[in-house]
Image (cartoon, grey):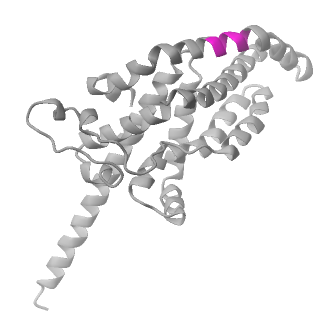
Amino acid sequence: GIYYFLTHPFLYPLLRARLLPCTLLSLFVLSSLFVWTYLPQVAFLAVVFRQGHSAWVNGTVLVLGEGAAIIAILFEAFLVDEAQVDIFDAVLVSEGHDDLVRTMRPVEDALLSGEYANPVRRLGRPTKASVYAPFSLRQIVEFVVLLPLNFVPFVGVPLFLLLTGYRAGPFQHWRYFKLRALSRSERDAEVGKRRPSYTWFGTVALLLQLVPVLSMLFLLTTAAGAALWAARLEEEKMMAEERVQSGTQEYAGDPV
């Protein structure tokens, strides 16, 4: 997702419009947390849980995790979710899946030249409610409940990232599931078939959200990566359907 975003300039305007305010917001939130809460939390880890040098590392992850949660919620006010939807749809259009995107918004036909050669400009306004990932109170509660895992020396941070990624991963394809009009049981089946992949994707996405200041950029690159994954799944699905049709035709033509 990061490489794709950086090498496809048609996505840049979606970042540029929100870059300055969201960067300032990130700096304000993280600097406030580190000034007022970092040393108390390190001291708490060192005294109560008797952690040595690991208290500094776990305290850093704890503060960054808290900052990521606060920033993610505040980013909603800056319509980052809307930008993620546009990025997701634009990548699908760029990869040739116009029909899938047209289920929820108009997409102009591509021209050999002109403004409509740009996948972002080809996107019309959504005709249905469009959300990249829904607000999940359960996910936020689980995030807060799991934060104390960072108190555990050495293994606490990886466990926190994996368990949080387990829940967060499938939300990265919420838009994809909506474009396919899947029911809840069908969504659960899709996630179940790829649970390890979704967990890993969610873990890496969360890890990137812990990078100070760049968390907004990584929100958008994660959307690009999720769309690329969806495009590959669509290609695999179409190839499987073609194989089934080819086998059916061969069977129908068998004189036996």
Q: In which quarter of the image is the N terminus?
A: top left
Outermost residue, top side: 35
Q: Relative to 169, does residue 22 appear above or below in the rendering?
A: above
- x, y (%) of residue 223? 43, 36
**Foreground pick, 253 / 72:** 72
Q: Residue at x 11, y 38 (%)?
A: 111
| Quarter of the image where one finds residue 43 | top right
Left or right, 139 with reference to 110: right
Q: Residue at x 47, y 13 (%)?
A: 20
Q: Residue at x 44, y 47 (%)?
A: 175
Left or right, 59 with reference to 230: right
- x, y (%) of residue 80? 49, 30
Q: Can residue 59 be seen in this view?
A: yes
Badge count: 0
Q: In which quarter of the image is the C terminus?
A: bottom left
Outermost residue, right side: 48
Within the magenta stretch, is there residue 32?
Answer: yes
Left or right, 76 with reference to 6: right
Region of the chain picked out in magenta, as a range: 28-34
Outermost residue, left side: 112
**Foreground pick, 83 / 144:** 83
Q: Is residue 155 visible?
A: no
- x, y (%) of residue 199? 55, 44
Q: Which secondary structure type mostly characterizes the magenta part of the structure?
A: helix
Left or right, 19 with reference to 171: left
**Foreground pick, 123 / 60:** 123
